[in-house]
Amino acid sequence: MVSPVSETTERCGSCGNDLRAKARFCDVCGTPVSARHSVGEHKQVTVLFADVVGSMKLAAALDDERLQELMNELFNRAASVVQRYQGTVDKFTGDGLMALFGAPVALEDHALRACISALEIQTVAGELAADVHRRDGIELHVRVGLNSGAVIAGEIGSGPGRYTVVGHAVGMAQRMEAAAPAGGVLCSLSTARLVEDSVLLDSVEDVRIKGAEAPVPARRLLAVESQRMVLGRNEGLMLGRDIELGRLRAAIDTPVTGIVGIVGAPGLGKSRLIAEFTTIASGQDADIVVARCEAHTSMLAFGVLSRFLRAMFAAAGLSGAEARRHTSAQLAGFVAPRSADEQILFEAMGIADADAPQLMVSVDGRRRRLAQIMTRVARARPGKTVFILEDAHWIDEPSDDVLADFAAGLRGTASTFLTTYRPDFHGALQQDLDETIRLSPLADTTAVSVVNQLLGDDLSVTGLAEKITTAAAGNPFFIEEIIRDLVGRDELSGSRGNYCLIGDVDTIAVPATVQAVLSARIDRLPGAAKSTLNAAAVIGAHFDIDTLHALVPGSHAVELTQLVAAELVDQTEFRPQQRYYFRHPLVRTVAYESQLTATRAQAHRRLAAAMQAHDPSGADENAALIAAHLAAAGELAPAYTWHMRAAEYLRSRDLSAARAQWESAQRIADRLPEDHDGVIAARIAPRTMLVSTTFFTGDVVDTEESYRQFRDLTLNSGDLTSFAVGTAGRIWSLSVNDNRLPEAVALALEMEGIVTEIDCDAATMRIILISLAYSRFASCDFAGALRIIGSVVALPQTEPAVELSVAATLRGVMELSTGENEQGHQHLHVGIDLARVLTPVSYAASLAYWVTMLAAIGMYRADDLVGEMRTALRRAESFGDMFGIVAAQWAYGSALLRASGESHDEAVAVLEHARASILKHRVWRLALTTIGPDLAMELARKGHPDQAISELRDLVEVQVRGGSRVFEGCASEALSELLIARGTSDDFAEAHAVVDRWQARRPGIPALDLWWLKSRAMLARAEGDASGYAELANQYLAACEKLAAHGRIAEARKMVESSRGQPR
């Protein structure tokens, strides 16, 4: 009887043969045996169960010796079949056997091999049954069940030779066998799907199995087409893309075509097409700049951009100082030496001088300036340059934004930006393509040509190309893998393009999945090389020798050489640091996911510890990566701490990235057990920061649900401080971003009811109180707002705070609006002076309150404000935060539009940019209360009054329904003016409705009535009421003079003068 695998130590990694204990060489292929530790791992396998039907009746009909002889013969024949197709007999069950296909050595076509074996087992059983019937006069039947799926494979027990697999897939295969008909083979649907293109299956039938309440679907295996039988793995060279290559060459020869995308599923030849094209382009004197994205750095901001810039300036492999000198020489004439732009570029490249002063420029600011620098340099290149970014589906978002802007700037030049990506990529680069080249599987004739170029023209390989082409089904990657497998099994010898056939390759079929293909190649490696590959997979798609040593101490020179030779990894850098990358991303995925969760966790844990120990001073900068490794290791509590640490580090640098860390911390906290010490506080902390900072980033899809969860969690736990901080941000969002003031006021009133119960420091209390003051200001409760601002100012102060600037600014606005001019001017200037020493975002926001309230309503001369606003915009753009930029654009554009001089068109352009950013980023919708009317009046000036009136009606409706009452008059004034100018009776009626509505809602604040007085006067004049016009014009002038509304006084005086000349 053939010995099962449990009686051997392991199997040959080259041919799969059972190895004798202590064997130094395989008895079949002669391959040296590498010492391996039996480590559990995930495998994709097909499990086969075969069983004798009616074995009890058979035992009753035969004596014991004859029964033993019969069973030995049957299972020797069955086991021979299994091993012929490189399966493994896992165990004998007395009247049956269990066999594995895909373990311990992975097989890319495990399901098909199992099907072939099952049918041949029935054949040999049938032959034996005929002999038994003639000799013993009894019937012998066997039934077989198959199921494919994931298992954990490894040794069970303390002694050697106990290799087996466990998992649901095993039990289901046994159930399939129990449900199979006598003499038949029953496949689960998981197996049937893998082989349906290669075998003949009966229709789906529902079968009842033990342990399942409902029937499960299955299919009977009827036959295997011999020409589709798979015995190998795949290899393939990426050629045969002449049509796509022609389109690519045509696209880059067109100056208008600035951005070209190549899209295709994994394995279809995107990288090979790029390689072929660069060879051609280089021969035509084009400069080639190539960078690749990496899966493991997709969450690290500017990681891809750093590699791209190093390639662009040919600085890869240079030391920091050398790279700076080399790059500076290329920047001459574009970027001043030792300037902020140069430092921004060097920091993005990762070559900045460690002693250089820190720049106060946000991530958004860096993005814009980097794109501008890169574009200037690229456009100045004397010849054609092709910039190539491969695998954009793994790009980080900041790099995506910068490179998209950079690529757009190449339009109209001799240069081209070329990128490859998978179909599921929808980033900024993919959104702005000029040309898209989509890759499909190769046509059969093209695929044959590819195979022939790989195999060569030796007579022995004649006919093999067609078999490989059929098996690969047009996927160039599969072609490459098949040929590499044939070489690995010593059926092909020689070198690429010069192979000769040694063994017999009767049939080849495409592996069921790429995972199976790569698992098979990985399992062929010597044990130490496979361990090295698995360790590298935990590190990421790219890895260096130092990190590998930190994870697995010792020299890996031999193993890395083997991995490079096997074309599983490539070396990208040799000196001063040795760096490698996985040749195919799916190689890394397969190697990573094959390891047990516990094994991966241990490796991630070691990596996190090594990163902390290697560079303690850079712990904050590496906090996000450390947290990711700890999370992958299942170390939830430490991972939470590091995510929160990373968020704090990123908060002032890139708020979006900080929010991503808080979101990760929140997910981890939600996974902590209920009895974990401090779990409620851990769940509240990241939610507090996410809710409170939504004001600065705009609403996300689940904002409402997130706030509800946060509210319930904080109130139920009695954490009033966190509730108040988060709700303060919610009040700002509802008021400023969403035009939902009634909801904001309701929250503020609730907060006022509990504020005396909150025990927190002065800085936190200022955050809470200033939101309450703003809600009262926006609803025109100036007395209530001033009362709360008094409480803010009375709190202990240790350093400048944005809340103090906002408090002073709002106080000044309210005082000026009610005629307290001296105090109002004083507090406004205090607020601005405080803002100047804060971040550009706070500075711009403070000016926005000032200029839009006072310049738009007419309380200041715009000429007096333009200089300050221009400075604010420059600071905000330099820092780069979108929230601050929009605020500064709002302030500057509003002031510039009302200023004297020839800046009208610039002002309109600034306001249009602001409106576009507001709508895109969902921040500062409050600004539309003045931007909208300003742009509507511009639209009317250009001859489109009807469209302007329509837009203004919408704005007024939004304001009345939920917007700030302080700004309600802006749209109402513009709408009344255009309705009166159009002059139909319906227009007059509508204008009356507008002013009458305000009369019913007047809050008794003089400044907010100015537009109302003016509009009533203009309406009286249009309707011929001269005395009414004169009376209202005089009231308007008197109010303007009393409030010192310098922006309106001249207009009011003209109205009074014109009223004196009208007949009464």
Image: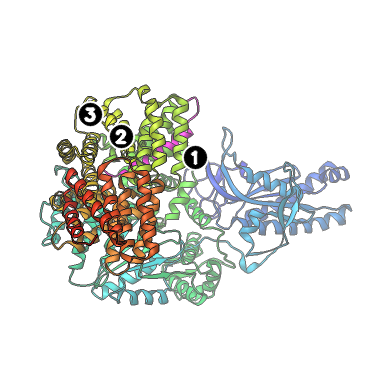
Secondary structure beneath label 3:
helix
Q: Which residue is mark 1?
A: 597
In this picture, which residue range is highlighted in magenta?
Answer: 653-675
Name the amino acid type tagged 2. Answer: Ala
Q: Where residue 385 appears, x then y in whole percent?
A: 24, 69
Provide the residue designation for mark 3: 793
| Amino acid on which disc 1 is placed | Thr
Tell me which label, 1 or 2, sits earlier in the chain: 1
Q: Which residue is drawn at the image coordinates 15% and 52% (left, top)? A: 866
Q: CA distance from mark 2 to mark 3?
A: 12 Å
Give coordinates of residue 962: x percent, y percent.
Answer: 40, 46
Q: Looking at the image, can residue 282 be seen?
A: yes
Pointers 3 and 1 in contact (CB under 8 A)? no
The 10 Å Cα crowd at callout 3, few under 14, some 14 to 19, many 20 or more, is some
Amino acid carrying mark 3 in the image:
Val
Mark 1 closeness class: few <14, some 14–19, many ≥20 residues within 10 Å: some
Residue 433 in the image: above or below residue 614: below
Q: Which mark lies nearer to you, 1 or 2?
A: 2
Task: Provide the secondary structure element on which disc 1 rests.
Answer: helix
1029 to 697, vertically: above or below:
below
Q: Which residue is mark 2?
A: 773
> Is residue 196 found left or right of 650 in the rendered image?
right
- Secondary structure predominantly adopted by residues drawn in magenta: helix
Percent of width and height locating residue 169: 63, 46
Q: Helix or strand or loop: what does disc 2 sit on?
A: helix
Image quadrant occupied by the C terminus: bottom left
Mark in front: 3 vs 1: 3
Contact flag, marks 1 and 2 (Cβ < 8 Å): no
Q: CA distance from mark 3 to mark 1?
A: 56 Å
Q: Which of the marked residues, 2 or 3, is nearer the chain's N terminus?
A: 2
